[in-house]
Amino acid sequence: MNVPFVDLKTQYQNIRGEIDPAIGEVVSSAWFVGGPRLKTFEEEFASFCGAGHAIGVSSGTAALHVALVAAGVGSGDEVITAPNTFIASTEAITLAGARPVFVDVEPESCNIDPGLIEKAITGRTRAIMPIHLYGQPADMDPILEIARRHDLTVIEDACQAHGAEYRGNKVGPLGHIGCFSFYPGKNLGAYGDGGMVVTNDPDLAGTVRMLSNHGQKEKNRHPREGFNYRLDAIQAAVLGVKLKHLERWNAMRRDHARLYNELLAGLDVKTPVEKEFAKHVFHLYIIRLSRRDELAEHLASRGVSAGLHYPVALHLQKAYARLGYGPGSFPEAEACAEQVLSLPMFPELTEAQIRHVAGAIAAFR
Ligand SMILES: Cc1ncc(COP(=O)(O)O)c(C=O)c1O
């Protein structure tokens, strides 16, 4: 049996009756940028997250970049974040002109350890960027409390966590501003690139909207320079259809995670820990073990595609040599990088496929 890592073709087959007319409507209207489809999707996504405002942008990276700039982060500033994430999180910080400052993670969730943040704050710190890695929220209350005390902006990287909840509230608008990616394989994925910024602050929302459309508030009037970071109407149409299915798809992911947990119990792998404050949406289902690379090869030989998220922590990437960290700087993040393996996880995964993956892991010696 083959078990792919994700299966977007099956998802499309299941919803093509809704997707094809939605795309057709945009094409026949010829309203490709902006327009009613985008406006409706922004309103629906804001209401889904419980946010006052949502602004569609062209990717998760663009969302993070424009959020940082709108929050006033710029040259000479420092932004505190975790080192075990996709490089887009820190690319956005550098793009804004600031410097990423890493803090180690707590081992159960691989999310930023709030107990270590305060020690990393300097006179240049402007923002904290927690990442809700794998679909599980970071521990937001202590982060928000530290931010309040030091007058820092909290920018959530929710690019992997559409619909995840922290103490019963959806991630995104928990801090000052939150960012989502709609990369195709995400829990809510476009048919191309896309992203969203959400916030409860009307001024920040206005600045994000202006900056993501060339710094214009009204046509041909540019109070400042911005970016071409707009979300296009075809993506908004696709996302609007898919948003209606998101809660059900997330529930299916959670059911699959429960079955994996059950079948892998007692084997020599650590299964994911769902923190007491979290509703995890399992964008990725991660196990941990020391012989990770050997298990990945073994699974491949049995038709199972596993993934690595992420095998080298950012502070050890050549791109960040200038930051002056080295091996041992963040032991927990380094252990995550060496040990995590992502098993196939998508809503359409079948029980037989999950049993096949678990059986292959049980047969690994
Ligand atoms: C944690 C995290 N941050 C940022 C991004 C960037 O999103 P995008 O690929 O849409 O630019 C991603 C997704 O790839 C991500 O997983």
Image (cartoon, rainbow, N blue to C red):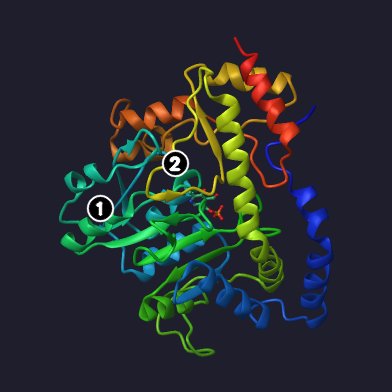
Name which residue type carries label 1: Pro
Residue that label 2 marks:
274
Residue that label 1 marks:
142
Q: Is residue 225 above or below residue 149?
A: below
Question: Residue 41: where, in percent of width, then height?
Answer: 62, 74
Name the quadrant containing residue 72.
Answer: bottom left
Q: Is residue 205 above or below residue 102?
A: below
Query: Residue at position x 58%, y 45% from top?
Result: 254
Query: Residue at position x 52%, y 89% from top?
Result: 220
For mark 2, give the secondary structure: loop
Name which residue type carries label 2: Glu
- Horizontally, is 321 left or right of 339 in the view? left
Q: Which label lies toward us, 1 or 2?
A: 2
* Of the image marks 1 and 2, the number of the one nearer the N terminus: 1
Query: Residue at position x 68%, y 47% from top?
Result: 347
Question: Residue 78: where, in percent of width, then height?
Answer: 27, 54
Q: Residue furthest front?
A: 262
In the picture, the quarter occupied by the C terminus is top right
Which one is in front, 9 or 264? 264
Tell me: is circle 1 under 8 Å from ligand 1: no
For mark 1, give the secondary structure: helix
